[in-house]
């Protein structure tokens, strides 16, 4: 029986697929759940679970199953198998015992989301798997699944070669700073082998993936498919994925401040950053969160809170971890920055050859006779005013801008402000205290831009500042009295607008520039923590 399903992540479709054979709906879901084993040198016999989510042979699993999501045993963001080869084992129609079926490679991964996408390339004998239609399940948003919702978890417990479906109940939903569903908690923990497996709803769709901090820990939280990267879905719609791209461990740049958001209350959540080779230096994070420095083998070099010093004797390959302690139950936005304190090398001076000193000739000085001054004409004009009526003094109104006495603003955009362009301005305040917020950022996106998702990717560190600014048509920062002004906006709309600051929830609204209304007063924008 042919069956066609759409793999959905929110409103993003991944592909079409079918299945043939004597399988019923439960058997098809079991067959789409596979066991993943690292087969390369030095892999150490690691194993986990995964789910086939595309008919072309793409397997979704937890990044912990195929890579290092922390500093235990190496650098975070690296693969367990250096050769990037993983054995895929699946159940047969006759029983639930799994057998070796295919070989897969990691093509996309995200360390912070703890998700990885593998592509099946061949069978164990080396025959290519291209053109084969794989049995798979579709993805579904977990947004409509509330508390006390029964789910079905499919995976392979550690030490077994058979599949073990089990029932669980969702008991908690955790949202992040942008009010997005970040975690789902189950009523009982799962065995370590379920990490990377399937959490299915009553219709057999994949709504979450069990994830764990390491391969030996029990699974207590599952990652909802609402956070499946939209970029992966777009690339899958365009064709097969090639190469290996691992996100979630960005590189800190000298003097550049990075903004990120914690995913919410979870067990031992950490964000990792690669450190430049410049030594000595300092890493600062605001607010004062715990920091730890680790080398390439995962050994902790130094720990601190708020500020971490890098010494000249430290190894060149280092990662710094921003840790959210378990006692910190609030979702946190933070800023991190690396500054090098190394002195620039002085250029070596080459001594010029010595020459005999020759005194220069003394110049002859001529004295001109004094010239008589012309007679001074009397003027009836006022003091400091020339005969044309213009002031001889400096016109301060022409030199200083009209907002130089406290109403000034910072305009980051370099676009021309013509008569046909629009302006939006306002004041940003703290919703609880009414205090004016300085340094808050206001961005205006192009028409049709999904600014909420665009800003979320930037704050999480999965999108660089250059890519974040590309689709924007205007941006500004508030001054010390909370006032901002964005100029150079073209007529049209509606344009999405976002106002955000460190430690506050972003606020979103829309504006429209028309011929009759080119100046828009957004009034007081109140940000909540």
Image (spheres, rainbow, N blue to C red):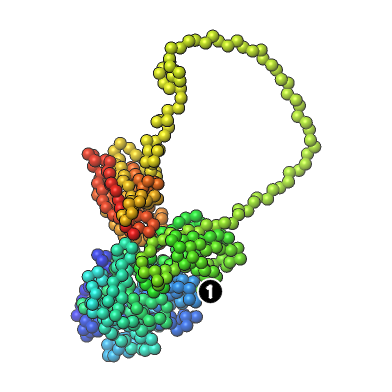
Q: State the image quarter where residue 157 is shown.
A: bottom left
10 Å crowding of disc 1: few (<14), some (14-19), many (20+): some
Residue drawn at the location 32% of the way across and 52% of the way down: 434
Q: Please tell me which residue is depicted at 35% across the width and 58% down the height of the picture.
A: 504
Could you tell me how many numbered marks the image carries? 1
Question: Is label 1 in a helix, a strand or a loop?
Answer: loop
Q: Which image quadrant: the C terminus?
A: bottom left
Q: Residue at x 43, y 16 (%)?
A: 382
Of 2 and 425, the residue lying toward us: 425
Q: Quadrant of the N terminus?
A: bottom left
In the orientation shown, which residue stands out farthest toward the right?
356
Residue 295 in the image: above or below residue 276: below
Name the spot of residue 109 as percent of width and height, x first.
Answer: 39, 70
The residue depicted at 24 percent of the width and 46 percent of the height is 512
Q: Is residue 497 above or below residue 104?
A: above
Rendering coords of residue 155 (x, y %): 32, 83
Q: Compared with residue 285, is residue 474 higher up or lower down, i.e. above or below?
A: above
Point out the residue furthest to the front here: 433
**Mark 1 = which residue?**
299
């Amino acid at each position: 029986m042919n069956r066609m399903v759409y793999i959905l992540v929110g409103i993003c479709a991944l592909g079409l697929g079918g299945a043939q054979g004597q399988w019923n709906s439960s058997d098809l879901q079991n067959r789409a759940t596979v066991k993943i084993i690292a087969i390369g040198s030095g892999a150490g016999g690691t194993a986990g679970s995964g789910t086939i989510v595309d008919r072309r042979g793409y397997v979704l699993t937890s990044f912990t199953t195929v890579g290092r999501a922390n500093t235990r045993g190496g650098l975070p963001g690296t693969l367990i198998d250096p050769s990037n080869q993983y054995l895929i084992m699946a159940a047969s129609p006759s029983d639930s015992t799994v057998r070796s079926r295919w070989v897969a490679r990691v093509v996309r991964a995200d360390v912070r989301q703890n998700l990885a996408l593998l592509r099946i390339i061949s069978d164990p004998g080396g025959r290519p798997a291209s053109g084969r239609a794989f049995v798979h399940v579709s993805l579904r948003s977990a947004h409509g699944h509330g508390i006390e919702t029964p789910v079905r978890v499919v995976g392979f417990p550690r030490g077994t070669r058979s599949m073990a479906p089990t029932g669980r109940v969702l008991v908690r939903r955790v949202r992040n700073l942008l009010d997005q569903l970040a975690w789902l908690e189950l009523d009982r923990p799962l065995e370590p082998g379920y990490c990377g497996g399937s959490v299915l709803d009553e219709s057999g769709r994949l709504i979450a993936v069990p994830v764990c901090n390491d391969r030996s820990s029990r699974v207590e939280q599952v990652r909802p498919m609402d956070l499946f990267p939209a970029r992966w879905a777009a690339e899958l719609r365009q064709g097969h994925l090639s190469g290996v791209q691992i996100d979630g461990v960005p590189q800190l740049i000298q003097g550049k401040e990075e903004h990120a958001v914690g995913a919410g209350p979870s067990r031992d959540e950490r964000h990792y950053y690669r450190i430049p080779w410049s030594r000595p230096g300092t890493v600062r994070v605001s607010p004062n969160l715990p920091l730890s420095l680790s080398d390439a083998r995962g050994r902790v070099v130094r720990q601190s809170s708020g500020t971490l010093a890098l010494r000249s004797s430290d190894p060149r390959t280092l990662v710094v971890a921003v840790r959210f302690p378990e006692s910190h139950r609030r979702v946190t936005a933070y800023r991190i920055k690396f500054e090098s304190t190394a002195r620039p090398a002085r250029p070596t001076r080459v001594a010029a050859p010595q020459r005999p000193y020759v005194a220069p000739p003394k110049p002859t000085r001529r004295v001109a006779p004094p010239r008589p001054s012309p007679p001074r004409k009397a003027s009836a004009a006022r003091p400091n005013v020339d005969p044309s009526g213009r002031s001889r003094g400096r016109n301060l109104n022409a030199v200083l801008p009209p907002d130089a006495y406290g109403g000034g603003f910072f305009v980051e955009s370099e676009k021309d402000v013509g008569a046909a362009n629009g302006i939006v301005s306002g004041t940003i305040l703290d919703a609880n205290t009414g205090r004016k917020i300085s340094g808050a950022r206001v961005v205006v996106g192009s028409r049709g831009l999904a600014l909420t998702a665009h800003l979320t990717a930037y704050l999480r560190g999965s999108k660089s500042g250059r890519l974040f600014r590309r689709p924007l048509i205007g941006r500004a920062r508030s001054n010390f009295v909370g006032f901002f002004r964005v100029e150079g906006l073209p007529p049209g709309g509606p344009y999405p607008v976002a106002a955000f600051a460190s430690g506050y929830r972003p606020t979103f609204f829309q504006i429209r520039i028309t011929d009759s209304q080119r100046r828009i007063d957004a009034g007081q924008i109140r940000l909540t923590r």
